[in-house]
Amino acid sequence: MAPTGKRTGESTRSSGPALPNSAGYLDGRLLIAMPVMGDSRFERSVIYLCAHSAEGAMGIIVNHPAGSIDFPELLQQLGIIKKGEHIKLPENAESMKVLRGGPVDTGRGFVLHSSDFYIENATLRIDDGVCLTATVDILRAIANGSGPKHAILALGYAGWAPGQLETEIQSNGWLHCDADADLIFGDDVDDKYNRALQKIGIDPGMLSNEAGHA
């Protein structure tokens, strides 16, 4: 269900140093981009890691809006609702965020959502509170009011080859912190980066290109 692979435009690394976290892999946590990364596609990104193992990692950027794309309009483009029917959508569907989830597979939608919704053989349960579903069925459910209480739709995802994320963390490219529902699903997308840093005790105003691990 959860794809992995190298980030677009980057070389594949077959191995890398161990994570600096004795807890092991970081699926279910948030990655916070550091200035030293130098990759404009991930500048000031907060990424929810959906999968992380020896085979690589996959995550969804939760704080980069997908331009002017509107969720009701997207439902029309997919043929889920007809033009003009958006006025009948449930409130959470009208206001649902469409995000730029990452540079890989940008033509595909990935829905991060609360665990009160589940589709057999289609939904990946990441932890007790968060799931990932990448089928059009969840969009239909959201449109008719039977979907999850909390959800964001992301176009594309971020992927890492085996050992690649570990190497980037060791190079001070990423910090990580515990995930919470507000940072994942909250409406204040523009403030998520600062709040994620504050969550681990870092003042965003003091951040520089020389920053290291928290």
Image (spheres, rainbow, N blue to C red):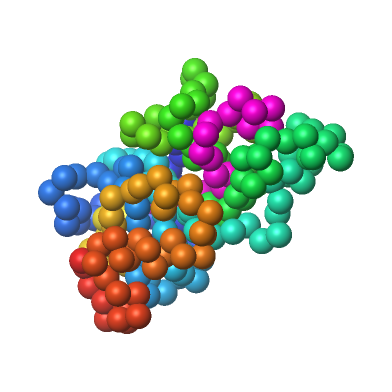
Residue at figure coordinates x 63%, y 57% from the top left? 66
Q: Nearer the viewer, residue 152 or 94?
A: 94
Figure check: 181 above or below 120: below
Q: Residue furthest right?
A: 83
Residue at figure coordinates x 52%, y 21% from the top left? 119
Figure check: 77 above or below 80: below
Residue 154 pos. (x, y %): 57, 47
In the image: residue 161, left or right of residue 167: right
Residue at figure coordinates x 68%, y 35% from the top left? 90
Residue 206 pos. (x, y %): 30, 81
- Residue 185 magenta: no
**Count of numbered tags:** 0
Q: Nearer the viewer, residue 42 or 44?
A: 44
Can residue 36 be seen from the camera position used here?
no
Location of residue 23 (image quadrant)? top left
In the image: residue 87, left or right of residue 188: right
Can residue 54 be seen from the camera position used here?
yes
In the image: residue 104, left or right of residue 130: right
Q: Nearer the viewer, residue 211 or 103?
A: 211
Residue at figure coordinates x 53%, y 40% from the top left? 151
Residue 106 pos. (x, y %): 61, 50
Image quarter where the C terminus lies is: bottom left
Magenta-tinted stretch: 142-160
